[in-house]
Amino acid sequence: MRERASDLAGTNDGDIVHLWTIVVADMSKPPLRGKVAIVTGGSRGIGLAVAQALVAEGVQVAITGRSESHLSAARPLIEAAGPGAVETLRADVRTYAEVERAITATVARFGGLDILVNNAGVGVFADVAAMTPVQWAEVIDTNLTGVFNATHAALPHMQRRGGGFIINISSLAGKNPFADGAAYCASKAGLNAFSEALMQEVRYDNIRVSYVLPGSVSTAFSSGDAAKGADWKIAPEEVADVVLNLLRHDPRSLPSRVELRPSKPRK
């Protein structure tokens, strides 16, 4: 090995001083380039940042969303992030047939499915007495049933592929409930339990499951103003970094749950 490196460096050129550069590739980390991913709720906020980060790594990425205008606006932003190909698909995760159709279309275009990021989520914040059954159903059906729908549709494709990775974007609200957040907190607590059970079910199919619990993130999700609190809140790109690190993690072990907090939250 050293003799070969010496030959490549040209050490027999008569010079006394040589600069040695050794590049070591970590072959234990799974390569991401060429993988196929689908990110639900990928047109804005955390989902958009995750899609951009994946494309920058050469991943072929499909995103879903309910709004055609948001999907159209997101596409050039994601394409500009890197070499990976991009597909945008309108789908409401609450409706199984729409999610299944989106995943089937992703597999048809890119030839398979390796990564599912369940990010789509909504929040309705009101006390239980004031919340309507329709509002409750919207939160639970999006944040929890939507994850089931996407996962159920994706699993057969991952099993045929010989493995995959499912990353669910949850929230610290799932373990730290608060007033006026009953529906949202319940949906995320359910998502945490779902993720733990799923992880145990599919681990021997070489399908890895992790869930990420961010604290306050600087998006338009709750306040409608992404700039509000940006000086102390988590940036969406920081959540995307966590997703990439999970995907790159040595498959010998699994960080199944990651909690991410602002370093200095508002007092």
Image (cartoon, rainbow, N blue to C red):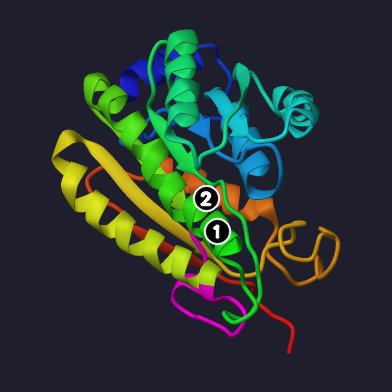
Q: Secondary structure at mark 2?
A: helix
Report the front residue among 57 and 170: 170
Tell me the kind of residue under disc 1.
Val
Q: Give the residue at the far left of this rendering.
A: 204
In-front residue for pair 28/128? 128
Characterize the local packing of mark 2: few (<14), some (14-19) or many (20 or more) Cα atoms within 10 angstroms: many
Q: Amino acid at mark 2?
A: Thr
> Where is residue 134, by image quadrant?
bottom right
Position of the C terminus, as image quadrant, is bottom right
Q: Where is residue 96 shown, x and y percent of the image?
A: 43, 34
* Residue 232 inside the magenta-drawn segment: no
Residue visible at 63% across and 62% down? 123
Q: Main secondary structure of the magenta part?
A: loop
Disc 2 designates what residue? Answer: 142
Vertically, is 247 above or below 219?
above
Q: Could you say whether the residue bearing mark 1 is in a helix, strand or loop?
A: helix
Q: Is residue 213 visible?
A: yes
- The x, y position of residue 31, in whole percent, is 41, 28
| 177 magenta-colored | yes
Note whether residue 248 is visible: no
Tell me where residue 219 sits by quadrant.
bottom right
For the record, the magenta segment spans 170-182
Quadrant containing the N terminus in the rendered view: top left
Residue 128: percent from the left, percent from the top? 57, 79
* Circles 2, 1 touching at the beta carbon (< 8 Å): yes
Q: Residue at x 62, y 43 (%)?
A: 47
The residue lying at 72 percent from left, 34 percent from top is 67
Q: CA distance from mark 2 to mark 1?
A: 5 Å
Q: Which residue occupies the extreme bottom position in the image? A: 267
Q: Which residue is mark 1?
A: 139
